[in-house]
Image (cartoon, grey):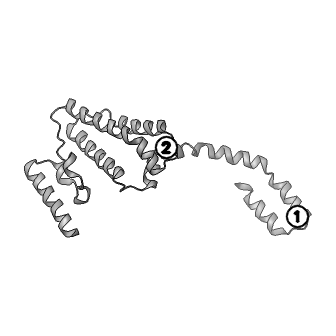
Amino acid sequence: MFKKASSSSIIQLNKAVSTKSSPLVANLSSIQSANFTDYAYIRSKSLEEANANVLFLYRRMLKILPWMKETYHVPTNLDVMRKTIHKEFKSFQGLSDTELIDALVIRGYIEYNEATMHHKQRGHIIKFFIESDVTNVAPHLQEYKRIMKEKVDTQSLCASVEGKGMGRNIGKYLKNTKDL
């Protein structure tokens, strides 16, 4: 059964390549062709048409965000999710090559379909929407270490541990962690 399904999708690919000779269609793998007929023939004739395709994809992405938040249990609000999608689309704003724009739109539809058909797991979705928040934590790490170093005075802690006869190993361990 799997052989039949993969061979039929390869036939679809070959048919698409022979009728509309596009390097984009030829490079799509048979694995990604589950809903291949929905967006495989995106081929913009002008920049305005390509921008209309991008805008249509952008609106579709924004419409599924509430469903995606509920289904995948994304621990962020919808505004952050919308801003992330907006930032992703803005990063490709200056493109003028219609074939490249079409390739990105096709890739966007593939991502859209993978998310809606549950081919993506919760971790994939969360990583996309929350990754930017995690990278902003790194600059604060040094400040956090400095505050913790001030709060825990390792010298006085070592003296109190050794004074109470709790053993020298704890004191040596604390002295070695003083660098942190």
Which residue extends farthest left?
19
Callout 1 amino acid: Glu
Q: Seen in the image, is 70 located left or right of residue 93? A: right
Residue 49 disc label: none
Callout 2 amino acid: Ser
Vertical comparison of 58 with 146: above or below: above
What percent of the width, then of the height, locates residue 73? 49, 50
Category of crowding for the residue at label 2, using alpha-carbon neighbours closer than 10 angstroms: few (below 14), some (14–19), many (at least 20): few
Q: Which residue is mark 2?
A: 132
Q: Is residue 76 visible?
A: yes
Vertical comparison of 85 with 20: above or below: above
The residue sitting at 20% across, 69% down in the picture is 3
Frontmost residue, 174 versus 137: 137
What percent of the width, then of the height, locates residue 64? 37, 42
Vertical comparison of 52 with 21: above or below: above
Q: Which residue is mark 1?
A: 162
Q: Seen in the image, is 79 located left or right of residue 44? A: right
Q: How many marks?
A: 2
The residue sitting at 53% across, 46% down in the picture is 134
The residue sitting at 47% across, 50% down in the picture is 126
What percent of the width, then of the height, locates residue 149? 74, 49
Local SS, label 1: helix
What percent of the width, then of the height, locates residue 46? 17, 32
